[in-house]
Image (cartoon, rainbow, N blue to C red):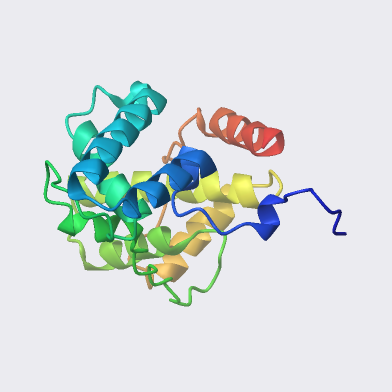
Amino acid sequence: MNIEGLDYNTQREKIILPEYGREIQKMVDYAVGLPTKEERQVCAETIISIMDRMTSHSRESEDHDRKLWDHLAIMSNFELDIDYPYDVSEAKKIMTSPEPLGYPMTQIPVRHYGKMVFELFEKLKEMPAGEERDELVRVTANQMKRNLLLWSHGSSDDEKIASDLARYTDGVIQLDLDTFQFDKVIEKEVSALKSNKKRK
């Protein structure tokens, strides 16, 4: 709906750095159009002082001033011809979006254990018997129990963990449930995680 005399943000030109607001952008546009370098310099320094007051919370950072001048250059599309106190040629990188991270598409037999647990299975296959492997078995079995409790609606079967551990390590690891002790804190940890998920 268009009502004569009303000026909607959606109808206005997009602001380059919205955190400074439209009025600062207008000041920057005005500075770019000034006829002499001296006038542009004075206007730019005035704009920087206003931007500094707006961002007083970040004054403690050592590159605070440089960022302000970088932002001024960006808002002017690098068309503001003044003597910058810093080299602003690198400022364009601020506006460059990072390359998207590749999502690991590795297939795993069961999702509830997760990719990292399957990496532990592979590690256990190669490790020689001894204290180090025993410790990794303990860590892996406890993590499997956590994952089962978290993703299987609270049901966790120690025999299933022992069976899966043997299965996914090609029989290398045989968990003796008569002697193996799971961490007692696991169920409390999982309950806390589940309640945090519900609150979100």
Where residue 115 sits, quadrant-wise, is bottom left
Write the residue at 34% across / 69% down: 99
Q: In this view, does 124 lie above or below 71?
A: below
Compare residues 132 and 148 and report the one nearer the observer. 148
**Is residue 127 left or right of 160 when viewed as pictured?**
left
Write the residue at 50% across / 28% down: 185
Where residue 170 sits, quadrant-wise, is bottom left
Compare residues 33 and 99 and report the one nearer the observer. 33
Write the residue at 18% across / 52% down: 88
Q: In this view, does 89 lie above or below 17?
A: below
**Is residue 120 left or right of 17 when viewed as pictured?**
left
Compare residues 138 and 148 and report the one nearer the observer. 148
Q: Can residue 176 be seen in this view?
A: no
The percent coordinates of residue 132 (x first, y second) are 19, 47
Where residue 14 sits, quadrant-wise, is bottom right
Image quarter where the N terminus lies is bottom right
Image quarter where the C terminus lies is top right
The percent coordinates of residue 45 (x first, y second) are 25, 34
Q: How many labels does the image show?
A: 0
**Is residue 151 left or right of 26 when viewed as pictured?**
right
Compare residues 174 and 39 and report the one nearer the observer. 39
- Residue at the extreme front: 35
Q: Is residue 81 visible?
A: yes
Write the residue at 20% across / 62% down: 127
The percent coordinates of residue 107 (x first, y second) are 48, 77
The percent coordinates of residue 169 (x first, y second) are 37, 68
